[in-house]
Amino acid sequence: MYKLIAVDMDGTLLREDKTVSERTKQAIQMAHDQGVKVVLASGRPIEGLNRYLEELGLCTEEDYVLSYNGSIVQNVGTREVIAKSALKGTDLMKLYKLSKELGVNIHAFSKDGCITPKMNEYSQLEGRINGIPVHEVDYDTISEEEDIVKIMLIDPVEVLEEVIKKLPEILYDEYTIVRSAPYFLEFLNKKSGKAVGVKALSEHLGIKREEVICIGDAGNDLDMIEYAGLGVAMGNAFDEVKKVADYITDSNEEDGVAKVIEKFIAMK
């Protein structure tokens, strides 16, 4: 019996217009009524998840959320942090230097929210997606020891594709690197990732790996889909995600998440 469902947001739970279908809301409620934990697992900051948590009724002290691609796992009602893995200002300086060498834009998330040394189209997009302000900040003013939750290289698809080819191999040993969207490349603490977050929450709740379903569509969902007892790829998922999944559902425009819940939870 499955006891926890971790669901990605963009491209998975959300339709292209960033809304949740009524069928999906009802399916989540059905799972919730059966005592199954439904947990949003997103690359977004918590501020970008709040309105969806409220809309789905996942705001009590019995509910949990994974933000920043699993870097922070917390109780929604109490805001208690169950697990956290951050980078430091030194990491930001290193990747900022690399971004200038490669000619790519950058932003990061710190205690001050989303910060960028130079305002650009994709930092503004980040702000719109999450409903948060984006601050233009001189990175030289940031302390080496300041906590940085995640760092992102951001630019059009064709630019990012070339950047990825030029990344030093050592970076993959130093960071968890995931592509959350065609125009977003994220750098996280090596101990971070959605799988790490799901595992930490499962252990906190006393839920076994085989009792977990994880659903996603993009590169930053790969690890949790591989970790889950039932790893599910959306019909619109990246090919590499579909290859590791145990099950492929319909797309985010076709109630793919609802159909998973109906098949593996609600109809049991």
Image (cartoon, helix red, strand yellow):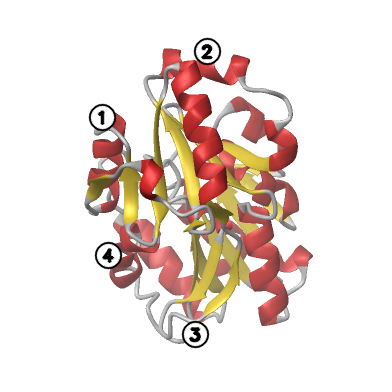
Q: Where residue 51 is drawn, which disc sits there? A: 4
Name the residue: 47% across, 26% down. Answer: 99
User: Label 4 neighbourhood size at 10 Å, few (<14), some (14-19), many (20+)?
Assistant: some
Name the residue: 63% across, 62% down. Answer: 197
- Please tell me whether mark 1 or mark 3 is closer to you in this view: 1
Measured in 3D between alpha carbons, the distance from the residue under mark 4 to the one under mark 1, in whole angstroms, is 26 Å
- Please tell me whether mark 2 or mark 3 is closer to you in this view: 2
- Secondary structure under tag 4 reads helix
Provide the residue designation for mark 2.
162
Of the image marks 2 and 3, the number of the one nearer the N terminus: 3
Front-lying residue, 33 or 91: 91
Q: Position of residue 49 (x, y in %)?
A: 35, 61
Q: Where residue 62 is drawn, which disc sits there? A: 3
Q: Amino acid at mark 4?
A: Arg
User: Label 2 neighbourhood size at 10 Å, few (<14), some (14-19), many (20+)?
Assistant: few
Measured in 3D between alpha carbons, the distance from the residue under mark 2 to the one under mark 3, in whole angstroms, is 44 Å
Name the residue: 71% across, 71% down. Answer: 1
**Residue 94: quadrant of the picture:** top right
- Please tell me whether mark 4 or mark 1 is closer to you in this view: 1
